[in-house]
Image: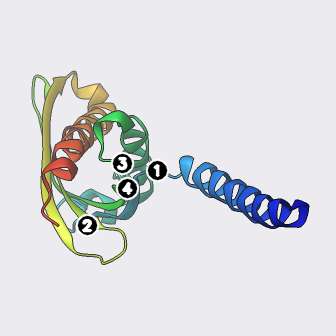
C-alpha cells in the first residue's frame, strides 16, 4: 500500500509544483505588449531636419509608460494582445502663444494570431508660451498616447472571439 501511495503522491506533487511555477512565470507578463511604434512621415517632417521632439524612441517610451499604467483588474484574465502605435499628426502653430495638436492611431491585435480586433485613436491639444514649444510637443504627444491607451481595457473586454 505504501508504494501505491507514493506512486500517486509524488507525480501529483510534481504536477502541483509545475502548475504553480507556470502560474508565477506568467504572472509578471503584461497582458498588453508594445509592438511597432512609428512616427508617420506627415508628422515627422521636423524629424527629417533633426528638429523633432517626438521621435520613434521617445514615442515608444511614452507608449510603454502608458501601458504600464493600465489597471490589470480591468482586463480579461486570458487577455494577451499587442498594441502598435503610430503618431499620425503633430501640428504646431506659433504666434503670441504656441499651440500644438497631436493624434495617434493604435492597432490592438491578438498576440498569437496577429488578428487586429480594435483600432484606437488618441488626440490631444495644448497651448503654452512659444519658448516652451518643444516641451509642449512632448506633453501633447504623451497626452494623445494616454488617450488611446485608456481605451485598451474596453476594447479588450468587448472583442469578439
Q: CA gap, disc 2 to disc 1?
A: 14 Å
Q: CA gap, disc 4 to disc 2?
A: 24 Å
Q: CA gap, disc 4 to disc 1?
A: 25 Å
Badge 1: residue crowd in 10 Å (few <14, some 14–19, many ≥20): some
Q: Which residue corresponds to mark 3?
A: 77
Q: Which residue corresponds to mark 4?
A: 55
Q: Position of residue 116 (x, y in %)?
A: 19, 70
Q: Earlier in the sequence, mark 4 or mark 3?
A: 4
Q: Are marks 4 and 3 in contact (CB under 8 Å)?
A: no
Q: Position of residue 129 (x, y in %)?
A: 22, 21
Q: CA gap, disc 1 to disc 3?
A: 11 Å
> Mark 3 falls on what kind of element?
loop
Q: Which residue corresponds to mark 1?
A: 30
| 132 versus 161 height, above or below | above
Q: CA gap, disc 4 to disc 3?
A: 33 Å
Q: Which residue is drawn at 78% across and 58% down?
A: 9
Query: Nearer the observer, disc 4 or disc 3?
Result: 3
| 16 versus 74 height, above or below | below
Amino acid at each position: 500500500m505504501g508504494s501505491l501511495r507514493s506512486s500517486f503522491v509524488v507525480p501529483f506533487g510534481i504536477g502541483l509544483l509545475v502548475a504553480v511555477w507556470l502560474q508565477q512565470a506568467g504572472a509578471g507578463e503584461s497582458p498588453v505588449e508594445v509592438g511597432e511604434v512609428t512616427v508617420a512621415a506627415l508628422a515627422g517632417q521636423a524629424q527629417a531636419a533633426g528638429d523633432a521632439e517626438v521621435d520613434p524612441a521617445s514615442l515608444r517610451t511614452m507608449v510603454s509608460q502608458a501601458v504600464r499604467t493600465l489597471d490589470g483588474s480591468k482586463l480579461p484574465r486570458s487577455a494577451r494582445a499587442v498594441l502598435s502605435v503610430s503618431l499620425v499628426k503633430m501640428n504646431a502653430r506659433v504666434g503670441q502663444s504656441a499651440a500644438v495638436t497631436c493624434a495617434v492611431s493604435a492597432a490592438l491585435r491578438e498576440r498569437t494570431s496577429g488578428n487586429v480586433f480594435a483600432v484606437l485613436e488618441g488626440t490631444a491639444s495644448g497651448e503654452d508660451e512659444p519658448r516652451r514649444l518643444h516641451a509642449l510637443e512632448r506633453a501633447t504627444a504623451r497626452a494623445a498616447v494616454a488617450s488611446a491607451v485608456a481605451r485598451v481595457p474596453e476594447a479588450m473586454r468587448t472583442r469578439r472571439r
